Image (cartoon, rainbow, N blue to C red):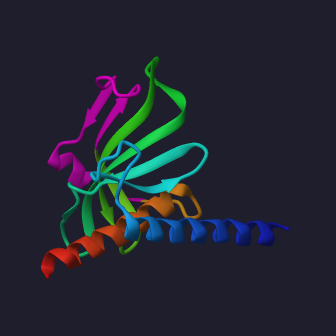
């Protein structure tokens, strides 16, 4: 029974990935109508998008990426409600690992309720965290890597 469940989960992830590729090929439009944010993953709890205007290549297959995560359910941070996060991270596509440079938390479109920043020295000393397999974060990371590589190839032409 567990094997069937694992196969179904992988199938759903594959279908989500195929949906991303099809959506990316047709339009980079986001819910807000701009071409800036591209949805890379979605489920009943999260809507994850990347800022297509601020992806920067670093070393090899390492990219600085800005993610926007909209939460279906409002969360609390130090007693303050939020339902959106904007996260700047460094993503290694070779092994799907990341470091977090900054996090801004919002309630809707209001001003940030909290901001966290990492200095360049702290970022370099931060351990790499591996994206957990079989999660929406893995779908988002794989889609981000695919978009970043394609974007880099377009720039080289």
81 displayed left or right of 53:
right
Q: Nearer the viewer, residue 61 or 24?
A: 24
Residue drawn at point x = 44 percent, y = 65 percent? 23
Q: Residue at x 40, y 72 (%)?
A: 95
Q: With respect to residue 95, does 118 lie above or below?
A: above
- Locate residue 17 relative to residue 141 in the image: left or right: right
Q: Which residue is drawn at the image coordinates 29% and 53% (left, top)?
A: 35
In the image, residue 45 sits, relative to residue 80, either above or below, namely below
> Which residue is farthest top?
79
120 in the magenta segment: yes
- Evaluate whether residue 62 shows in this view: yes
Q: Is residue 57 left or right of residue 140?
A: left
In terms of image quadrants, where is residue 45? top right
User: Residue 137 location, x and y as percent?
Assistant: 49, 56
Q: Is residue 132 left or right of residue 104?
A: right
Q: Is residue 149 magenta?
A: no
- In the image, which residues are magenta? 102-129
Q: Is residue 119 above or below residue 60?
A: above
* Residue 44 image-quadrant placement: top right
Q: 118 or 87: nearer the eye? A: 87
**Position in image of residue 71 (x %, y %):** 50, 37
Residue 68 placement (x, y as % from top left) = 37, 45
Which residue is drawn at the image coordinates 19% and 71% (left, top)?
59
Q: Quadrant of the C terminus?
A: bottom left
């Amino acid at each position: 029974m567990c094997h069937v469940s694992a196969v179904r989960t992988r199938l759903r992830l594959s279908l989500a990935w195929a949906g991303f590729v099809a959506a990316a090929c047709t339009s980079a439009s986001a819910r807000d109508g701009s071409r800036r944010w591209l949805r890379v993953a979605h489920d009943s709890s999260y809507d994850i998008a990347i800022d297509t205007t601020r992806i920067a290549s670093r070393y090899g297959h390492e990219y600085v990426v800005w993610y926007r995560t909209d939460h279906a359910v409002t969360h609390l941070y130090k007693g303050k409600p939020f339902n959106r996060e904007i996260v700047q991270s460094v993503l290694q596509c070779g092994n799907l690992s990341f470091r977090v440079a900054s996090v801004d938390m919002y309630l809707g479109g209001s001003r940030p309720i909290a901001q966290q920043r990492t200095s360049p020295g702290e970022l370099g000393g931060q351990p790499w965290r591996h994206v957990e397999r079989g999660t929406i974060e893995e779908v988002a990371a794989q889609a981000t890597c695919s978009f970043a590589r394609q974007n880099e190839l377009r720039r080289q032409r």
